[in-house]
Amino acid sequence: MNTIPLCAPGIPLRGQVTLADIRVAAEYLAARHNDTTGCATLMQAEIKGAIAPIMDRYKATMDAYAAAEAAAHAQLTELLVRSPHLFAKPRSLAVDGVKAGYRKAEDTLDWDDDEVVAKRILALLPQQYDLLVRTQVSLVVDALAALSPEDLQKIGVRTVTGVDSHYITVGDNDAEKLTKLVIAAAAARQGDDDKPRAAKGKAKAGKAVPA
């Protein structure tokens, strides 16, 4: 098997990033993703007859493709982190099934003490107390999110505005779903842990603003 370059050539390691750099990196990620998807499709075609031998035969190739795709993804992510100013408008770009850019995270609600807020709800919004507060005095965050900003302010609940964050998505057909499973297995074999971080906040207050 030919050696697979881990990163797109010609991308600056530091300094100013251009949209052209991001496009090149996105194209390279798309190509590497096509490699892993193509390999997974070939594997899927033979799985019915002999699952274990096929998995063994493709494991090394998938590991190599998965490592290259992971490196390409990391490279594109690093470029996005360095260049939020390039995505004021439009907010994203799409290249060969890869979509990358920035989008606003969901707003969250925050408060200091459940019991204090529950008492304020009872005093100020008694008609909604049963809807907003559980019997063990814990707040129903989905119902709170439906209150007006004025009512939230009265009872001491703050809306935490979602921050702008970069993102990357890659197409998702049946073969690519299999690819994700195989890549996850390959990553596990390599000791990688690429789980997304949980969003900080007590409750979701609304849907993310689409890119």
Image (cartoon, helix red, strand yellow):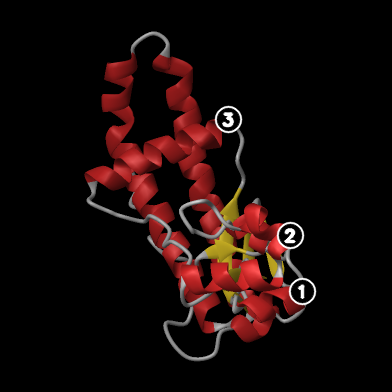
Dot 3 or dot 2, earlier in sequence: 2
Amino acid type assigned to the residue bearing label 1 in the image: Pro
Q: Which mark is residue 174?
A: 3
User: Which residue reaches farthest bottom?
Assistant: 15
Residue 5 visible in image: no
Residue 200: x %, y % from top left: 47, 69
Query: Is residue 46 left or right of 30 when viewed as pictured?
Result: left
Q: Which mark is residue 90?
A: 1
Q: CB under 8 Å between callouts 2 and 1? A: no
Q: Is residue 22 above or below residue 46?
A: below
User: How far apart are the two marked residues, 3 and 2, measured between alpha carbons?
Assistant: 49 Å
Q: Secondary structure at mark 1?
A: loop
Q: Secondary structure at mark 2?
A: helix
Amino acid type assigned to the residue bearing label 3 in the image: Asp
Q: Depth check: give the residue in front, 149 or 26.
A: 149
Quadrant that contains the C terminus: bottom right
User: How far apart are the two marked residues, 1 and 3, measured between alpha carbons?
Assistant: 30 Å
